[in-house]
């Protein structure tokens, strides 16, 4: 067995990135995946003869992926066809509309027309604050191994001390937004960024306002859908020598002499390795899904700490009325009651709805006939309750009707009859065990949540974690960074262990081993 053999469990973005980077650095890498195709949550759902994104739909921080492809001897632009979006999203409150743009001046002007000059100035101040928070945390937190608060302050250094003291961890995002916007609709719009990491704007820290800066810095539209990114990362790994084993669920992570030593597949086959990178949700390790020996590697995740799940309709549908762009958000009238219901484990009576129209561009041109849509409504992460889903057919029907009513208030008519697949929290729980269908790992509620997220290293040497449920957080670029951090930690630990192995020295005097006397 090569001294640098690695098994990667799971072909989500974090696992694909780890595998490609480790192989590019000369490791012998085997990636095992329970599903038949790569991507994890970045999945394509076959509906009516078309492949429709059933997971993330917004691609940001392109430079993160450019750096990863470059480290593997490739160029992102040669592998994935994409173009920048000039309009970030279209937002609706009944018949009221507001678009946000890649050009911040255009967004500021649109907000002024929508809510008045004072809120336009508030947006300018909010945008500056979001950028400050992002710049303060990008290198010392998001691109570094998981720190504790003291380590983060040390990494930020004397020049960053002022930023460290004003990261706003003790103020909720919702309350902070009220200081910038008097129009509650703008609080809703920018509070929605909390859901990008599966959290509530009423419970997550204002620090997460930095997410809006990430999106304002550029959104890219990928030809063929987001799944093309997963396929490109798989091809990158193959070119560097990664072996991919699909339809190969892992039964156990093998622990020998206190460290990871490979995996046993569900069929009984054992794959030996000197290190293992697990791209599953760490909650699955802590729950014993990979065997009792590996269970102590991570802290268990309490149900109350889970992030949001979702009801996701992937459809080839006929639409009329509302002029959709690629990304569209239809807000409820009462955001607070919506999140109160989710916290209580219920579907909202009148939910906000996100619609990704995959066949539309910035100009909003609709295709002839049915078009590909992903429709999302936030849901509680209770998919592992009872028989596998907390919702009856009647509750699911009511949720579908509530979703259709929400978009119809803005003038959008949807005919889902041609072809539709609904994925519930119970379905997500089956795909991602021990999560209840939570799609973003633990929720980012409270000032300490980010520091409690599982890091790359675990309590078992040779076992590492990657993916959107680990540090630095949820979302495609964060999952990619987690994969890079896991690879870096593995290589650093391997180098350290190699240096610590005693080597025979030529020459010298041969001496008998010293005998020790037991202490009394």
Image: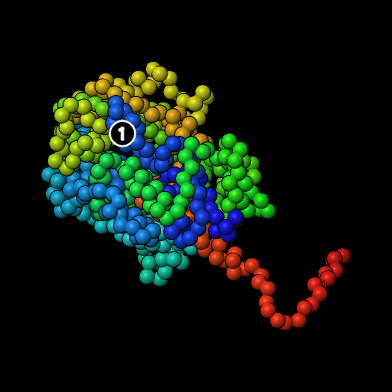
The x and y percentages for residue 399 are: 34, 24
Question: The C terminus appears in which quarter of the rendering?
Answer: bottom right
Whether residue 51 appears in this view of the structure is: yes
Q: Secondary structure at mark 1?
A: strand
Q: Which residue sits at x=33%, y=58%? A: 74
The x and y percentages for residue 499 are: 59, 69
Name the foreground residue: 370 vs 101.
370
Q: Which residue sits at x=50%, y=52%? A: 29
Q: Is residue 141 left or right of residue 121?
A: right
The x and y percentages for residue 107 are: 17, 49
Whether residue 182 appears in this view of the structure is: no
Rendering colour mode? rainbow
Is 112 situated above or below 408? below
* Residue for badge 1: 51
Q: Quadrant of residue 144?
A: bottom left
Is 155 situated above or below 134? below
Is 60 situated above or below 390? below
Q: For mark 1, does the 10 Å Cα neighbourhood hold few (<14), some (14 to 19), or many (20 or more) residues?
A: some
The x and y percentages for residue 222 are: 26, 45
Q: Which residue sits at x=48%, y=36%? A: 247
């Amino acid at each position: 067995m090569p001294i640098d053999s690695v098994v990667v469990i799971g072909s989500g973005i974090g696992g694909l990135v780890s595998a490609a980077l480790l192989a590019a650095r000369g490791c012998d890498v085997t990636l095992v995946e329970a599903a038949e195709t790569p991507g994890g949550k970045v999945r394509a759902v076959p509906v009516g003869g078309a492949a429709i994104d059933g997971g993330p739909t917004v691609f940001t921080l392109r430079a993160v992926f450019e750096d990863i492809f470059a480290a593997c001897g490739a160029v992102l632009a040669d592998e994935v066809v994409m173009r920048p979006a000039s309009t970030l999203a279209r937002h609706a409150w009944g018949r009221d509309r507001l678009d946000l743009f890649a050009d911040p001046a255009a967004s500021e002007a649109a907000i002024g027309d929508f809510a008045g000059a004072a809120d336009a100035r508030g947006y300018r101040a909010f945008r500056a604050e979001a950028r400050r928070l992002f710049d303060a945390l990008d290198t010392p937190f998001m691109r570094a191994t998981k720190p504790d608060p003291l380590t983060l302050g040390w990494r930020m250094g004397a020049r960053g001390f002022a930023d460290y003291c004003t990261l706003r961890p003790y103020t909720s995002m919702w309350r902070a937004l009220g200081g910038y916007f008097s129009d509650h609709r703008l609080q809703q719009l920018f509070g929605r960024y909390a859901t990008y990491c599966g959290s509530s704007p009423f419970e997550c820290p204002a620090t997460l306002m930095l997410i809006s800066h990430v999106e304002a810095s550029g959104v890219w539209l990928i030809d063929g859908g987001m799944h093309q990114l997963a396929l490109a990362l798989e091809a990158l790994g193959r070119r560097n020598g990664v072996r991919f084993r699909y339809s190969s669920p892992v039964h156990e992570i093998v622990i020998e002499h206190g460290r990871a030593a490979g995996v046993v597949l569900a069929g009984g086959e054992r794959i030996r390795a000197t290190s293992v990178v697990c791209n599953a949700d760490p909650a699955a390790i802590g729950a014993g899904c990979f065997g009792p020996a590996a269970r102590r590697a991570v802290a268990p995740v309490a149900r109350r700490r889970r992030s949001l799940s979702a009801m996701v309709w992937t459809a080839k549908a006929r639409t009329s009325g509302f002029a959709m762009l690629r990304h569209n958000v239809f807000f409820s009238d009462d955001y607070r009651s919506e999140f109160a219901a989710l916290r209580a484990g219920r579907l909202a009576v009148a939910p906000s709805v996100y619609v990704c129209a995959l066949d539309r561009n910035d100009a909003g041109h609709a295709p002839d006939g049915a078009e590909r849509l992903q429709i999302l409504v936030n849901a509680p992460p209770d998919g592992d309750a009872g028989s596998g889903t907390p919702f009856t057919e009647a509750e699911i029907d009511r949720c579908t009707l509530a979703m259709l009513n929400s978009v119809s208030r803005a003038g959008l008519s949807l005919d889902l009859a041609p072809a539709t697949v609904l994925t519930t929290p119970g379905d997500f729980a089956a795909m991602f065990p021990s999560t209840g269908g939570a799609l973003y790992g633990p929720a980012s509620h409270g000032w300490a949540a980010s520091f409690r997220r599982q890091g790359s290293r675990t309590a078992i040497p040779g076992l590492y974690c990657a993916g959107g449920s680990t540090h630095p957080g949820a979302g495609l670029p964060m999952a990619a960074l987690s994969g890079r951090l896991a690879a870096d930690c593995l290589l650093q630990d391997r180098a350290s262990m190699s240096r610590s192995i005693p080597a025979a020295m030529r020459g010298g005097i041969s001496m008998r081993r010293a005998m020790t006397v037991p202490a009394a």
